[in-house]
Amino acid sequence: MGITETQVPERSSLYNPDLAPTTTAHRTWGTYNYISLWFAMCMEVSTYMLASGLIAGGMNWKQAIFTILLGNLIVLVPLLLNAHAGAKYGIPFPVFVRASFGVRGANVPAILRAVVACGWFGIQSWIGGQAIHAMLIVVWPAVAATPSSVWACFLGFWALNMAVIWRGVESIRVFQGFSAPFMLVMSLALLTFALVKAGGPGLMLSEPSRFHSTREFLRFFFPSLTAMVGYWATLALNIPDFTRYSKSQHSQVVGQALGLPVAMTLYSFIGVAVTSTSAVIFGKPIWSPIDLMARFHQPFIAFLAMVGLLVATLNVNVAANAVSPSNDISNLYPRLISFRTGGLITGFAGLAMMPWKLMASFHNYIFEWLVGYSALLGPVAAVMIADYFVVCGTRLDLQSLYRRGGAYEYRNGINPRAMIALAAGVLCALTGRFVPAAHWLFDYAWFTGFFVSGAVYVALMRASRLKAFAP
């Protein structure tokens, strides 16, 4: 089936140009674009703080790198599986999810994904604002005496993100082309500077784990691994938003398989190394790179580092945290809500989620935020993958994705079996959050929700088909 020849009902309430299948003219992303996409999205402050949080929590550098690499190899699997439909049919996440949840039911997982992305958008805007404030302190120290300046920087950076979103998704591809190599150079420069201050890598590599037993380590390791998976559980759902622009399946598979694990491991090592070095220099691990830069008292170096943080934060915030919720919110009422309007709603929702509280400590960031929302997104990924590969065999009726009364109408536009499977996975994972005896269910929140929802969905769909063909 050629996407360029496929006609979709443009007058349908489920259609707008932003949600339409991409044509050959739109398919401009090659292997390098996907590698640079992941390098650009991984090389930013929240990735650094993810790695540094593990060091601050007690891991040594080998344990932290192993945890991060394993988590990203795991999440790469559902990410590539969901990416397939985007590259094959040219459809974004909120349209793809209609196949499993129904043309109306798709709004439920889309909004779950959008809410998480709005939280991330706010977090990245807060980090960017802090970086701007730190730069101002370097060039204008008196600004530190003005508490309101932090909020002014935060809102200024937020407005800059809004401006980039308004220009559209193609600006992301152009921006990534130079931001990825720039951030690599800046990150290596930061690592070199920290190692020089510490007198070489020997002390950093010799920093021991602060866990006194294997049991104590595993108690920290398993929820940390879940957090690593949860970190990109968002993109594992909406990756079709990007692979719909791929020149071929080969381009997106190779680009992502090379980009995600390599970029995350490399940049995480920088975060781990610099944080371990900070423990040598200052006597305790400093997990925030912004706080760390302020301690070096090197204005020129600090200023360049903050510029790098801003470039990375702006890039990942728009690519990872604005594209998907903009499409998801647009999907609520495609005829009236465009991608740009959805992006504006995303920005204001991010403010409302109070990101300064989510980033108050590494515990809030890793074990509350990352693990917590993975309980919502793991079940969604399971239903999507089970439906597309197990139930449908990668075959979709493209026209029915954009109209009522078609193959994905189910019951009044909602697939009740998908909703039951989603609820089962979420409830099972969140049970561990509130029942101490079952806390391990929450420690494995993404895995718990994924396997429970996937198994329930396949069982219900097969049962319904057997019932339909029964004499």
Image (cartoon, grey):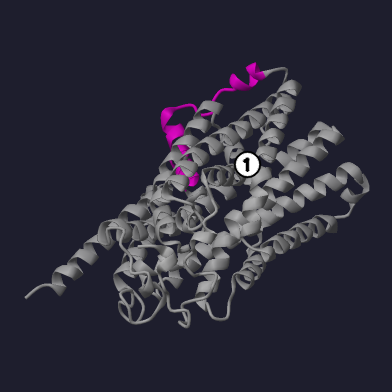
- Dividing the image into 4 quarters, which one contains the C terminus? bottom left
Q: Relative to the observer, which residue lies in front, 326 or 442?
A: 326
Q: Provide residue 389's location: percent of width, then percent of height.
A: 30, 56
User: Which residue is under mark 1?
Assistant: 43
Q: Is residue 205 left or right of residue 445?
A: right
Q: Nearer the viewer, residue 322 or 213?
A: 322
Quadrant housing residue 286: top right
Q: Position of residue 437 (x, y in %)?
A: 36, 50
Task: Relative to 36, say whether 397 is above or below.
Answer: below
The quadrant in which residue 296 appears is top right
**Residue at 48%, 65% in the rendered image:** 112
Task: Determine whether the residue tagged by mark 1 lies in a helix, strand or loop.
Answer: loop
Give percent across and percent down for residue 225.
46, 41
Say few, some or many: other residues with alpha carbon within 10 Å of mark 1 (under 14 / 14 to 19 / 20 or more): many
Q: Is residue 29 above or below residue 192?
A: below
Rendering coords of residue 197 (x, y %): 76, 23
Q: Identify the residue shown where x is 68% and y is 30%.
A: 188
Task: Check disc 1 and give the amino acid type.
Answer: Met
Up/down of 176 relative to 415, above or below: above
Prevailing secondary structure of the magenta residues: helix
**206 within the magenta span:** yes
| Residue at 73%, 51% in the rendered image | 128
Is 439 left or right of 143, judged from the image as shown?
A: left
Question: Which span of residues is magenta-colored?
Answer: 201-229
Residue lying furthest left in this view?
471
At x 44% / y 59%, what residue is drawn? 376
